[in-house]
Amino acid sequence: MSTNIGVEKKNGFFGEFGGSYIPEDLQKVMDILEEKFEYYKNDKEFIEEYHYYLKEYVGRDNPLTFAKNLTKKIDGAKIYLKREDLNHTGAHKINNVIGQILLAKRMGAKRIIAETGAGQHGVATATACSMFDMECIIYMGKLDTERQALNVFRMELLGAKVVSVDKGQGRLKDAVDAALSDLVENYKNTFYLLGSAVGPHPFPSMVKHFQSIISEESKRQILEKEGKLPTAVVACAGGGSNAIGAFAHYIDEEEVRLVGVEPSEAPTLTEGVPAIIHGFKCLTLVDDEGNPKPTYSISAGLDYPGIGPEHSYLKVSGRAEYVTVSGEEALEAFQVLSKTEGIIPALESSHAISHAMKLAKELSPDDIIIVNLSGRGDKDVEQVFKMIKE
C-alpha cells in the first residue's frame, strides 16, 4: 500500500492546517507514536499482518458495484458504489481500527480508548479489542447514545465500556474532548485509537494511510471495469476519514473531481474559518467568541464542527470541492437507494448518494461517478422510521 500519495506534508502540516497544539507531556507521546507509525507502516511483517486481517477478518477486497437501476432512474452518468458497507462491522471504520490496533499491540498497549459519534468506529474498536484481548473504553455523546442505542448495545456485547458524555451538547465533539482528557491523564498505559482524520499529528496521516485502501481498490477496480478513471469521486465528510480514504489515490489525478459532501446543518468546509480544535488547525465553525459552534446533523457521524486538516487544505487549494446536502435530502436518498438497488445506506453515506444523484444529471452517460458507500444503514433504520412517521 503506497503512502506517497496526495498532498505533501511537513511536520504534520497540510499548508497552514494540521500540526500539533497539545501539552508538552502529550507531545512526547505523539512523538513516540509518530516514530512507531513511520517505522511499522514500512515493515514487511506489519504490512503482511495488516493485509491478512483485511482479507480474512474484514472481508476485503469489497466490490465496486455498478448501480444499474439508480443510473437508469437518474438518466445521466454511470454511478458506481464502493461497498464499504460490506466490511465486517458494516462500515469503513474497521480499516483504520485494524491498522491502529496492530500498531498498539507492537507498542505494548493493553488499554484502548476511542471516541464515536454514529457508533460505527466504537463498534469496530470494540470488535478488534475483543479479538486482541485489550481493555476497551468508548466515549460517546449522551445524545448519540440515545439515537444509536443499538450500537451502544453492540459495543457492550463485545466487552467495551461505553462512557456517556453529557457535557456540552453531548455529541461527537464532546466525546473527543473526553477521550483526549483521558489520554492526558493516562498516556503512559493508554493508546487512543482515533477514528477520524482529525486530531494532532500524526493521527490525520495515520488514519489516511489505513483508509487509503479504499481508493487503492476502487482505482484498480474502475480501470478493470471501464478502462478509464472516474469523472468524480463523491464521499460524505464529517471528520473526514472515509472521504480522505476515498480520495487518496486520486489526488494526483487532476482530471478526477473530488467532491466532499457535508450536512447543510454543519457546513464546516463551506462556512468554517481557520481555528485550532482538538490539538490541530482546520476549518472550523466558530461562534462570535471564537469557540467551536454547536452543530447538528441527522447523521451522528457528520456532527462535528471541524474537519480533517488535509480536507481543509484541499478546499482552500481548490483541488477538492465541498458541497452541502440537507437532512431532508439525505433522508430521501436513503429511501431511493433502498428501493432502487436493495441497499440500505447509512445516513452519513446518504448525503453522498443525494449529491451524486444531482451530479449525475449534470453529466453525460459516458461519465462515471464513484460514490463511497461508507456504511450500511442498519444502525439508522429505527431513527429513520421515527422521522418518517413524524
Image: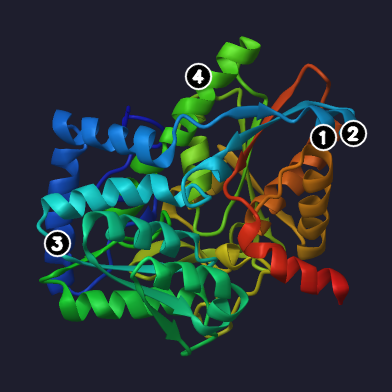
Q: In which quadrant of the rendered view does residue 175 lie? A: bottom left
Q: Which residue is mark 1?
A: 70
Q: Which residue is mark 3?
A: 109
Q: Read off the residue under disc 2.
A: 73
The answer to whether the residue labelled 2 contacts the one labelled 1, judged by CB atoms less than 8 Å apart, is yes
Q: Residue at x 41, y 69 (%)?
A: 157
Going from N to C along the chain, the mark reached first, 1 or 3, is 1
State whether residue 152 appears in this view: yes
Which of marks 2 and 3 precedes in the sequence?
2
Label 4 or label 1, whichever lies nearer to me, is 1
Q: Which one is nearer the viewer's eye here, 298 or 205? A: 298
* Earlier sequence position, callout 3 versus callout 4: 3
Placement of the C terminus among the 4 image quadrants:
bottom right
Place of residue 160 in the rendered image (x, y in percent of width and height, measured from the top left): 34, 71
Question: Looking at the picture, how far across and down is residue 268, in whole percent?
Answer: 59, 63
| Residue type, label 1 | Leu
Q: Look at the numbered disc 2 and give the secondary structure of its residue.
A: helix
Q: Residue at x 30, y 61 (%)?
A: 200
| Viewer-nearest residue: 252 or 238 | 238
Helix, strand or loop for disc 4: helix
| Label ID, residue 254 | none
Q: Is residue 317 visible in the rendered structure shown here? A: no
Identify the residue shown where x is 59% and y is 81%: 146
Q: Which residue is mark 4?
A: 220
Q: Mark 4 is on which residue type?
A: Arg
- Above or below for 224 versus 249: above
The CA distance from mark 1 to mark 3 is 46 Å
Location of residue 88 with respect to 147 vertically, above or below: above
The mark that comes first in sequence, 4 or 1, is 1
In the image, what residue type sits under mark 2? Lys
